[in-house]
């Protein structure tokens, strides 16, 4: 629907907000109706049809839990399941706002907003109606295209949902916890979140926590003063301070000890760090994104991960689906990587035999996108012809893991044995070269080291 023809209702008990939205929308749309009292919402809807409704999450009469907004959303949806509702929300309420999407809101807008952003959100919310879709259905191809600039590809519904969440959460200050198996793209998503945030021009600093031993954890993250320990020849800033004004990405957060968790929690709670060897706290201004492939909530249930730290990290959670749950994205990505590695190796881009595509779709991809990427790279380099055949993809090592996974009813011990044997075999094949073995297994070096540790190898 064209913005100019739209009739818009705005419900908020803050008259300043109502005034501002009215002033902004008046020249852009056909009609703007504003209402201060949510109790009158339903009677307004009985009298007139609106193309979109801006609905505040919180009303002064209540405790600011966002529940009243969710309540009125459900009443609107009862009356008109196809209503287009955009929730108006404050910074601290992002998780409730994300809940509102599940409850049928088309989108949400975080206060304070840029005017252009409000208009863009409204225009996008009005779009699907014209196409005859349900209002909450995300316009798939547009989003896929908009994420290609971050090298993040995917047209499956599961990935469209991820892209939608990134769009919504990126321009906020919410801490984001990224969950998902190895190689699902958590690091790419972290970068996209930073690049789409208001902090994009400021530093993006990463810290691989799995690679930090107990001894260097504090100094790496919080910095140290000269002379704090034997090797500290000069003052050094930690990652928290290096990321000042920008984003700090803490990778493999599930792997840190309880002592490290306590230190991290103190820094996040106090919004300051104390460099090793100093007693002067340094204030921090970071947006935190963390990632793990560990089952964080299970760890918390076993008292191995602090719940209070999880609550600091997971204002919003984004779970990256495994590649095997992304349908035809496997083929889309395979073609993308084939083009990429053909160009890199100065070869013509190969085509895929139908049987090859079938084989790629059937493989369970335990190493996810990273495994697919390396498998295609290998096939492109080794192939003689211009068409990739099924035999160009040998999954022997990983097929064993898959076979183990398929027999998982036999218990985690069996699966663990298969994993251990596979790792041993691949390392042996590469004469102990961990980098090459990790590449073949579709794991990062760190992830492989972690597994070696797990299996006492
Ligand atoms: N949706 C995607 N589109 C294109 N490339 C992708 C996508 N997802 C992941 N990749 C590629 O797959 C590889 C692994 O991605 P990434 O390192 O972000 O995964 P990860 O989940 O952080 O892995 P780990 O948990 O092992 O650290 C990278 O080379 C990345 O560029």
Image (cartoon, rainbow, N blue to C red):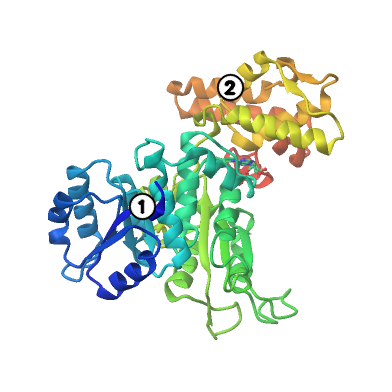
Residue at position x 35%, y 48% from top? 106
* Front: mark 2 or 1: 1
Q: Position of residue 63 (x, y in %)?
A: 20, 68
Q: Position of residue 13 (x, y in %)?
A: 22, 69
Q: Disc number at residue 5?
A: 1
Q: First in sequence: mark 2 or mark 1?
A: 1
Q: Position of residue 255 (x, y in %)?
A: 53, 52
Image quadrant of ligand 1 equals: top right
Q: Is residue 325 above or below residue 38?
A: above
Residue matched to label 2: 361
Residue at position x 32%, y 57% from top? 87
Q: Would residue 304 be visible to someone looking at this image?
A: no
Q: Is residue 440 left or right of residue 129?
A: right
Q: Disc number at residue 329?
A: none
Q: Is residue 361 left or right of residue 67?
A: right
Determine whether the residue tagged by mark 2 lies in a helix, strand or loop. helix
* Residues at marks 2 and 1, CA–CA distance in whole angstroms: 46 Å
In which quadrant of the rendered view does residue 425 lie? top right
Q: Quadrant of the image for the C terminus? A: top right
Determine whether the residue tagged by mark 1 lies in a helix, strand or loop. helix
Q: Nearer the viewer, residue 349 or 443?
A: 349
Q: Position of residue 54 (x, y in %)?
A: 30, 58
Q: Would residue 397 be visible to someone looking at this image?
A: yes
């Amino acid at each position: 629907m064209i913005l100019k023809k739209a009739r818009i209702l705005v419900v908020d008990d803050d008259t300043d907000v109502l005034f501002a939205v009215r002033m902004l929308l008046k020249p852009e749309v056909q009609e703007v109706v504003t209402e201060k009292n949510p109790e009158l919402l339903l009677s307004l809807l009985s009298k007139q049809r609106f193309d979109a409704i801006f609905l505040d999450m919180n009303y002064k009469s209540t405790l600011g839990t966002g529940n009243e907004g969710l309540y009125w959303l459900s009443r609107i949806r009862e009356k008109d399941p196809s209503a287009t509702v955009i929730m108006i929300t404050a910074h601290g309420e992002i998780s409730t706002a994300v809940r509102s999407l599940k409850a049928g809101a088309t989108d949400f807008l975080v206060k304070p907003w840029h005017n252009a952003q409000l208009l863009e959100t409204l225009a996008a919310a009005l779009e699907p109606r014209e196409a005859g879709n349900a209002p909450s259905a995300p316009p798939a191809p547009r989003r896929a295209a908009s994420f290609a600039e971050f090298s993040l590809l995917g047209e499956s519904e599961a990935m469209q949902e991820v892209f939608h969440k990134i769009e919504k959460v990126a321009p906020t200050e919410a801490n984001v916890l990224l969950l998902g198996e190895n190689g699902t793209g958590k690091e790419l998503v972290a970068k996209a979140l930073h690049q789409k945030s208001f902090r994009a021009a400021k530093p993006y600093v990463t810290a691989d926590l799995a690679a930090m031993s107990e001894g260097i954890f504090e100094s790496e993250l919080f910095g140290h003063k000269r002379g704090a320990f034997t090797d500290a020849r000069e003052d050094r800033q930690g990652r928290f301070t290096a990321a000042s004004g920008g984003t700090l990405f803490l990778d493999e957060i599930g792997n840190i000890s309880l002592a490290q968790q306590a230190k991290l929690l103190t820094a996040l709670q106090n919004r300051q760090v104390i460099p090793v060897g100093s007693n002067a706290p340094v204030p921090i201004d970071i947006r935190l994104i963390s990632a793990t492939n560990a089952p964080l909530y299970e760890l918390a249930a076993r008292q191995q991960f602090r719940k209070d730290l999880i609550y600091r990290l997971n204002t919003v959670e984004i779970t990256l689906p495994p590649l095997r749950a992304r349908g035809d994205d496997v083929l889309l990505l395979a073609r993308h990587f084939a083009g990429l590695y053909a160009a890199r190796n100065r070869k013509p881009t190969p085509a895929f035999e139908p049987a090859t595509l079938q084989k790629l779709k059937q493989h369970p991809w335990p190493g996810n996108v990273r495994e697919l990427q390396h498998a295609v790279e290998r096939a492109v380099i080794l192939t003689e012809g211009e068409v990739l055949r099924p035999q160009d993809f040998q999954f022997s090592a990983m097929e064993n893991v898959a076979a183990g996974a398929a027999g998982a009813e036999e218990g985690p011990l069996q699966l663990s044995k298969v994993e251990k044997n596979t790792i041993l075999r691949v390392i042996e094949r590469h004469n102990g070269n961990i980098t090459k073995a990790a590449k073949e297994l579709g794991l990062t070096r760190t992830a492989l080291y972690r597994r070696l540790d797990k299996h006492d190898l």
